[in-house]
């Protein structure tokens, strides 16, 4: 038996800790965790904006969907959202200098309302003038929403 909680978008706004296998693979600093802020999407009651999911300055919109499977609710993401510039990650530019992100066909992204956790399974890829150059890879990213107090502690003690 699994416990489910009613979805409340406010539980998925504020501070969050991102643990990313993409960052584990490509981080120049050796850090694979980031402290980010999230905010409610003003035009969609089931969506939030992840500010700086992979890199500062790049916002990613995700949507929560309980209709697909109420016991295993999904996180959906539009394609062609910019997650990062290429140069800081690869040391060079292969396409338009953007690394793009979308849902992966390798698995379904999902969330747990009770725990305030989201798990993204994403494909990162590169394009040049609208034509795909290639896939960087498929990576798992966990997002744990935390309190303001915990975020301040992580900033102070962990330098996040």
Image: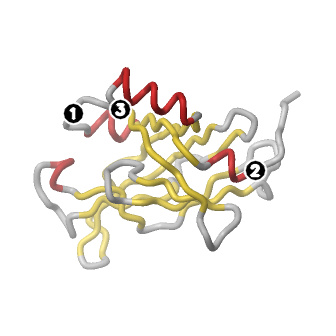
Which quadrant does the C terminus fall into?
top left
Q: Residue 19, labelled with which disc?
A: none
Q: Which residue is mark 1?
A: 29
- Return the disc, 1 or 3, that comes first in the chain's sequence: 1
**Do we see residue 108 in this rendering?**
no
User: Percent from the top left, x then y, of residue 116?
Assistant: 66, 38
**Do we see residue 130 in this rendering?**
yes
User: Percent from the top left, x then y, of residue 45?
Assistant: 70, 65
Q: Residue at x 78, y 49 (%)?
A: 7
Q: Name the residue furthest bottom.
A: 129
Q: Name the residue furthest left.
A: 92
Which mark is in front, 2 or 1?
Answer: 2
Q: Which residue is mark 3?
A: 160
Q: Nearer the viewer, residue 44 or 110?
A: 44
Q: Is residue 153 above or below residue 10?
A: above
* Distance in Å between CA atoms under marks 1 and 3: 12 Å
Q: Which residue is mark 2?
A: 8
- Return the disc, 2 or 3, that comes first in the chain's sequence: 2
* Distance in Å between CA atoms under marks 2 and 1: 35 Å
Mark 3: secondary structure: loop
């Amino acid at each position: 038996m699994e416990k489910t909680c009613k979805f409340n978008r406010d539980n998925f706004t504020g501070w969050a800790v991102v643990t990313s296998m993409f960052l584990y693979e490509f981080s120049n600093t050796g850090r694979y965790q980031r402290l980010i802020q999230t905010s409610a999407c003003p035009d969609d009651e089931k969506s939030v904006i992840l500010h700086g999911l992979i890199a500062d300055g790049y916002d990613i919109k995700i949507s929560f969907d309980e209709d697909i499977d109420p016991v295993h609710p999904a996180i959906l993401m539009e394609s062609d959202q910019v997650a990062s510039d290429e140069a800081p990650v690869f040391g060079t530019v292969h396409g338009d200098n953007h690394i793009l992100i979308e849902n992966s066909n390798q698995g379904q992204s999902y969330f747990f309302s009770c725990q305030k956790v989201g798990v993204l399974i994403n494909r990162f890829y590169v394009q040049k003038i609208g034509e795909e150059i290639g896939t960087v890879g498929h990576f798992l990213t966990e997002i744990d929403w935390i309190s303001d107090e915990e975020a301040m502690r992580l900033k102070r003690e962990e330098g996040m």
